[in-house]
Image (cartoon, rainbow, N blue to C red):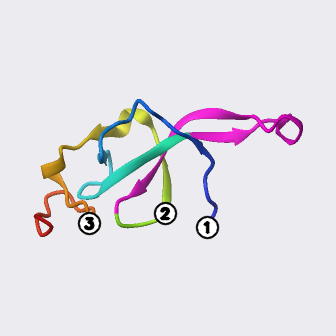
Amino acid sequence: MKRRHYERAPEYTADAYRVAGSDGIAYDVLGWETEPDEGTDWTGIEERTGKLVVQMIGDDRHFIVDPDDVTPLAEEEYCPECGQIGCHCYR
């Protein structure tokens, strides 16, 4: 599995997010996806793609999503252990 490169996104401060099209699962926003440009070998600089790298809570796989598809969740809306939206087994 390819690990995505990303740059931290300090503007995403919620503990979890809902992603459109993936109902029932809470995600962490890891940051802005970056990709190498033609000078990266010399400069080490990567450019943002405009997409976000997110990770399901309770999993380690990375997904690429559009920032318009991400909505913050309140703490009581999801389970911080299993990542299910609406699960209250943790509380």
At x 76% / y 34%, what residue is drawn? 45
Q: Neighbour class for label 2 at 10 Å: few (<14), some, many (≥20)? A: some
Circle 1 sits on which residue? 1
Q: Nearer the viewer, residue 42 or 33?
A: 42
What is the spatial separation of the Cα atoms under label 1 and label 3, in whole angstroms?
23 Å
How many numbered discs? 3
Helix, strand or loop under label 2: loop
Q: Neighbour class for label 1 at 10 Å: few (<14), some, many (≥20)? A: few
Viewed as shown, does residue 29 lie left or right of 32? Answer: left
Residue 69: % across, % down: 36, 38
Discs 2, 1 touching: Cβ within 8 Å: yes
**Split into 4 quadrants, where in the image is the C terminus?**
bottom left
Residue 42: in magenta span: yes
- Splitting the image into 4 quarters, where does residue 83 fall? bottom left
Amino acid bearing label 3: Glu
Q: Neighbour class for label 3 at 10 Å: few (<14), some, many (≥20)? A: few
Amino acid bearing label 2: Arg
Viewed as shown, does residue 85 lie left or right of 32? Answer: left
At x 79% / y 39%, what residue is drawn? 44
Amino acid bearing label 1: Met
In the rendered image of this protein, does residue 60 appear above or below residue 42? below
Helix, strand or loop under label 1: loop
Mark toward the viewer: 3 or 2? 3
Circle 2 sits on which residue? 61
What is the spatial separation of the Cα atoms under label 3 and label 2, in whole angstroms?
16 Å
Residue 70: % across, % down: 34, 39
Tell me which segment is drawn in magenta.
33-57
Circle 3 sits on which residue? 81
Residue 5: in magenta span: no
At x 14% / y 64%, what residue is drawn? 87
Viewed as shown, does residue 54 lie left or right of 39? Answer: left
